[in-house]
Image: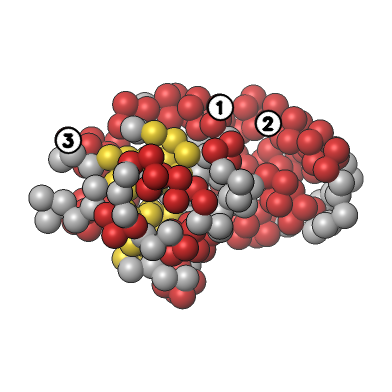
Amino acid sequence: MSNYKVLLLDFDGTTACTIPAIYHAAKSMLALHGYEVDKQVVYDNFGLALPFAFRCFANDDSIDDATIEKMIEEYNTIYKEEGEPLIELFDGVIDTLDRLTKAGIKIVIASNNVRPVLDRLTANLGIAQYISDIVSVEDVENVKPAPDIALEVLRRCNISGEEALVVGDSTFDMDMGRGADCHLCGVTYGSHSAELLREHGARYIIDKFSDLIDIVLK
């Protein structure tokens, strides 16, 4: 028996260690535009959607939309060619997803990333077979921390928030899930601290991915 029907699983910083790849690609791209990047700023805010992230990383809210579009293209090229080889799953992800899906739990990626990248990385990292759906920035009007992505998952799965567990490493994940009345689980090995995750509503805090088994399965 399980406590939840669906896991809304964040990808970056929760399922896969993508922060080094994101930092490398963002630093390289922003250098082309004359910006220096503070590593800690990237690590603290990498869960943001790219337009917001780049303005944050550059500490420049005046970057216009046309420049942001060019930045996204440049970033995506660097990320794919130089960043993705750096990406690895966190310990225990495959075994945990295998056990949960065999127990009938539906796993949905709920991410501020874009669908082509998520499709490629879940396939390359060997977890695509465990993912029943992906809800990404293309599917909603407002990205995390707004609740839209979580609400879209609930709609597609035809469940209530009480039947869903959001798993993420950032306050953006917690705020999204709380806004959709989901239960919340924060992971401590990503971008934000256990204390900060609790402040944003995390019901559970885990130090390793495999701890999800004890939370989800009775």
- Residue marked by disc 2: 76
Residue 20 seen in the current view:
no
Regarding mark 1 in the picture, which secondary structure is present there? helix
Q: Residue 32: which disc?
A: none
> Which kind of residue does numbered mark 2 sit on?
Asn
Mark 3 or 1, nearer chain start: 3
Query: Crowding near pointer 2: few (<14 within 10 Å), some, many (20+)?
Result: some
Disc 2/disc 3 C-alpha distance (Å):
35 Å
Kindly identify the residue that appears in the image at 47 percent across and 39 percent down. Answer: 135
Mark 1 or 2, nearer chain start: 2
- Residue marked by disc 3: 102
Residue 115 seen in the current view:
yes
Quarter that holds the C terminus: bottom left
> Which kind of residue does numbered mark 1 sit on?
Pro
Kindly identify the residue that appears in the image at 56 percent across and 58 percent down. Answer: 145
Residue 188 at x, y percent in the picture: 41, 61
Q: Are marks 1 and 2 in contact (CB under 8 Å)?
A: no
> Which kind of residue does numbered mark 3 sit on?
Lys
